[in-house]
Structures are given as C-alpha cells and as structure tokens.
Amino acid sequence: MQQSGLGLIDSHAHIQGKEYSGDTAAVIQRAGEAGVEQIIVVGGAGDMSSNTAAVALAESCANLYATVGMHPHDAKDVGEEELRELKKLAAHPKVVAVGETGLDYFYNHSPREVQRRVFAQFIRLAGETGLPLVVHERDAASETVKLLRNEGAGKIRGVIHCFTGDYDAARNYLDLGFYLSFTGIITFKNAEPLREVARKVPLDQMFVETDSPYLTPVPHRGKRNEPAYVRLIAETVATVKGITLEEVAHTTTRNVRQLFRI
C-alpha cells in the first residue's frame, strides 16, 4: 500500500465484497496513492461470511483492520451460534470493533423488536470484549441512544457510522462519547443540512469514511465507491469548516486510532 503522506483513514469500507472480486489489490493500491494510510474493513453486511472475509482480508495486509458484527437488516438471522462465532472472531488481533450493528427503521428488513434485541446483545458483546461499537442507525436515533445508555451503562464507546441526522441527534451521540462518521453524502448537492451539522460537530469527534461500495461522493456518484475517495469527503469537511485538508486528515486519523487502538 504505497502512501502519499496525507495519512487519511477510511474508517468504514466493505471492500471484502463481491463488488471488488479480482480488483482488491488495485483498490488498496489506489487508496494508498490518494493518501489513505489505513482502511477499516467492516463485517456484517449480508451474512456471516462477510465477517470471515473481512478478517481474512485484514490478515493479508498490514494496513487493514476488521470489524465483526451483523447489520440490523440481518438481525433476524442472528442466533446463539452466530453470536458464539462472532465472539470468537472478535478475539482476532486484527479485529478492532464490534459491528456494524444497530437499528434501521427505514427499511425494517428485520422486525424492530428483533433489531432491538440483537443490538442489545452486540452492545453487551462490546462490553465483554472491551471493543468499541460501529453503529448503523437510520430513522431510529432516540431508540439507539436509549439502548446505548441502558445496555452500555455509559461505558461503551464507538462511532455512529454514516451519520445523517440533525444536530440534536448529533449532540445526543456526542454526549455519550461517540464519534460521528461522515460519508460521501456530505458531498451531495442536496446535503446542505448535513454539511451544517458537520460544521458544528467538533473535529476531534469526527471520522471520515466511504462505506464502499456505497454512497460514492461527487464527482464519481453513480459509480462503485472505493477507499481512495475518502479524500473527497475529507476535502468537503475541510471546506465546510474553513480549515485545511491536512488538519482534517491529521485529526480524524488520530480519532480513529484512539477509538480502535491501532
């Protein structure tokens, strides 16, 4: 992974997926050339195989790390056997967090009560393993905060990935000690309300991520996303805050390393 010296981290990418079949090495190479120093490969999207694939990919490259969990879309498929397997995977030295996990009340692919039960189990797993949480939340901010407070007892730390909420939601998460991570959505023409939130969120509580292969930033919107494009997200944050790209890179990278202990 050749690096340009900017030192960014893509804090959330699914580059272990079929979208990158046969192309993963080139994607990682382009990331390094764009100034991306490390990539967090996030498990849990689809089925259990995404977790084992994330860990295997992280094992194969010094600058990659993994997380393990199950997306709330797939909470209905999480039972005791899956939880045991995830706890075992969480002990791997390249695994830095539990997730992604959380609540998605926009699509409701899993029943809401099942999502809440499984999310609570993952919060407890984070407590047992000492790992932080990578949280997916859509249209469920109040219940997400409630579960984090009740199950985490104020001791669990983590990141709200792909944050798209208003400033009140942001404030509630920040008060819990969570970081907020911004994706390519922040570059979209109609995302001025989100840019306004990013303007107010302290830089020392922000991450940047691509959520590859999804949410590709402008000007590549409509194409497959990849970690190299996290630079475009960091550039937008810099513009919104009136600071340099280097400052965004330095601080968000420090934040990721502090939370994930890498």
Image (cartoon, rainbow, N blue to C red):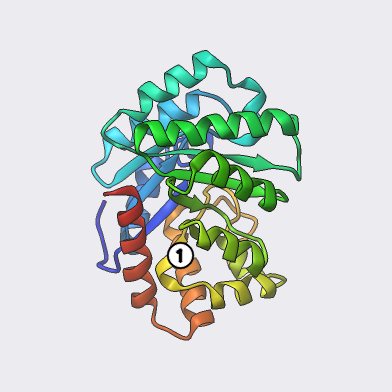
Tag 1, which secondary structure? Answer: strand
Q: Residue 35 location in percent, x, y? A: 32, 64
- Residue at image x 59%, y 61%? 172
Pick the front one: 38 or 2: 38
- Residue at image x 36%, y 21%? 88
Pick the front one: 30 or 55: 55
Residue 8, compared with residue 51, is above or below; it is below
Q: Residue 261 location in percent, x, y? A: 28, 49
**Extreme residue toward the bottom, this view:** 242
Pick the front one: 80 or 23: 80
**Residues packed near mark 1 inside 10 Å, few (<14), some (14 to 19) or many (20 plus):** many
Visible residue check, residue 218: no
Q: Residue 171 location in percent, x, y? A: 58, 66
Q: Is residue 39 left or right of residue 179?
A: left
- Residue at image x 46%, y 43%? 133
Number of marks in the image?
A: 1
Q: Amino acid at mark 1?
A: Met
- Quarter of the view holding residue 240: bottom right
Residue 92, compared with residue 149, is above or below; it is above
Visible residue check, residue 201: yes
- Residue at image x 63%, y 35%? 72
Q: Residue 184 location in percent, x, y? A: 57, 62
Give the residue pinned by disc 1: 206
Q: Is residue 139 left or right of residue 64?
A: right
Pick the front one: 250 or 112: 112
